[in-house]
Image (cartoon, coloured by chain):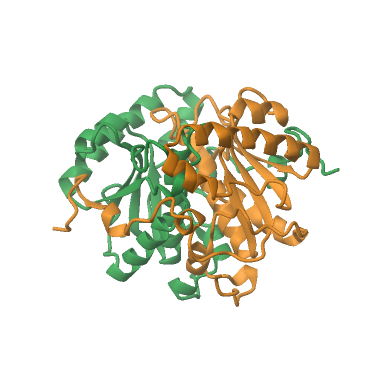
Chain colours: A orange, B green
Amino acid sequence: MADVPTHEPTLAPLYDVIQRRRDVRAEFTGAPIPDEALKRIFAAAHAAPSVGLTQPWDFVVVRDKELRTEFQAHVAQEREVFAASLNSETAQTFSRIKIEGILESTMGLVVTYDPSRGSPAVLGRHAIADAGLFSVCLAIQNFWLAATAENLGVGWVSFYREPFLQQLLDIPDRIRPVAWLCVGPVSQLHTVPDLERHGWRHRRPVEEAMHYDKFGRQLQH
Amino acid sequence: MADVPTHEPTLAPLYDVIQRRRDVRAEFTGAPIPDEALKRIFAAAHAAPSVGLTQPWDFVVVRDKELRTEFQAHVAQEREVFAASLNSETAQTFSRIKIEGILESTMGLVVTYDPSRGSPAVLGRHAIADAGLFSVCLAIQNFWLAATAENLGVGWVSFYREPFLQQLLDIPDRIRPVAWLCVGPVSQLHTVPDLERHGWRHRRPVEEAMHYDKFGRQLQH
């Protein structure tokens, strides 16, 4: 278990938060989230950079139990779809891994992408259509870090089909759901990611990700 | 001009950093970046969450002047492509906006996405193919915030064609460049985004982005 943070949320150092942040599945308590904390977290998400200053994200707070139960059942089906694609050894490892805390968390947060915002002339998107989608992810990371500073857990669930989620929450066709985040107080944040603790995969050293001037040139010249 | 930060980089509070962060074009000084700062920033980027713990990003540090000059010329061409798509009033506004600091910044950083990492069985990607791309964006936001904590500026350039950048830096076909970031010390960070200062677009209030249980339900019930 990670050390309990010693800072006020509003003073939590960025670097500490980045290292403490985890993708949470099993540790949600379901306790309420203070309104002031939520306000600060959404302000942080909304302060993310965006292509052409379009701020193409929307935030759908899902507290309704029935909607979450429907979503959870869909995710359970998709878990089976994935499990069926695995060889027996990998399937064994996967069987021990919890993939979502949809009902145990305090709320779901669906973050969406609206490509029409600021269009047709989106500054910075004519050559890279996905640039708006990238902006939404930057807002998600701000959200995730701010929630961590507030001692909340966040778990990104991606075992779902986008059309299912669109229909469930009346999301228009032109708007794409990008993430379902489980959000809420947690009993603890582990120091090692779940997938590493359960033997699914290990992290690689950052040095292996570094290249200099040309891709594949690993030593600084 | 924003207040000069009063915290040591390693203690800079997350919330301050999130509000101070800007997308920088004109303020790069070209001064060197201390090695220790770079190490901390890349460690922060590499600590981002990723689908199935794949960490599918790579970081290409581009310091070579010739490569940067070639890239800058390509971006200038793409600026013209975009300008030609605008009506005369919008084109006038755009003409006053600087879109990159490729040569003035201390270095370029190209962040890439490798879909093959951890495949074929990427936990959390079978239903959403873009989930790996999303992970790369989370690492970019960690990078951006850490650089801001170190009092560096970052500017995301997206006026380029991906195949051009692949060829320039020998990036293999299967690997996708996601961003060119200009990085380095700056004379200042503005408090208002460039695009707002230059009248391109204004930010919207966060309340307009909030929905409850169903998309379009704007008042909390």
- Quadrant where the C terminus of chain A is found in the figure: bottom left
Q: Which of the 4 quarters of the picture holds residue B202?
A: top right
Residue in front for this viewpoint, B168 or A70 = A70
> Is the residue B178 above or below the residue B191 in the image?
above
Q: Can residue B187 be seen in this view?
A: no
Q: Please state the horizontal and vertical placement of residue B193, each as a whole percent of the image.
A: 52, 49
Q: Please state the horizontal and vertical placement of residue B77, each as a whole percent of the image.
A: 29, 30
> Is the residue B116 above or below the residue B13 in the image?
above
> Is the residue B146 above or below the residue B200 in the image?
below
Residue at image point 59% right, 74% down:
A5
Q: Please state the horizontal and vertical placement of residue A179, each as a whole percent of the image.
A: 59, 40
Give the left or right position of residue B172, taking residue A84 as reference: left
Residue in front for this viewpoint, A115 or A172 = A172
- Quadrant where the N terminus of chain A is found in the figure: bottom right
Residue at image point 45% right, 56% down:
A196
Q: Can residue B11 be seen in this view?
A: yes
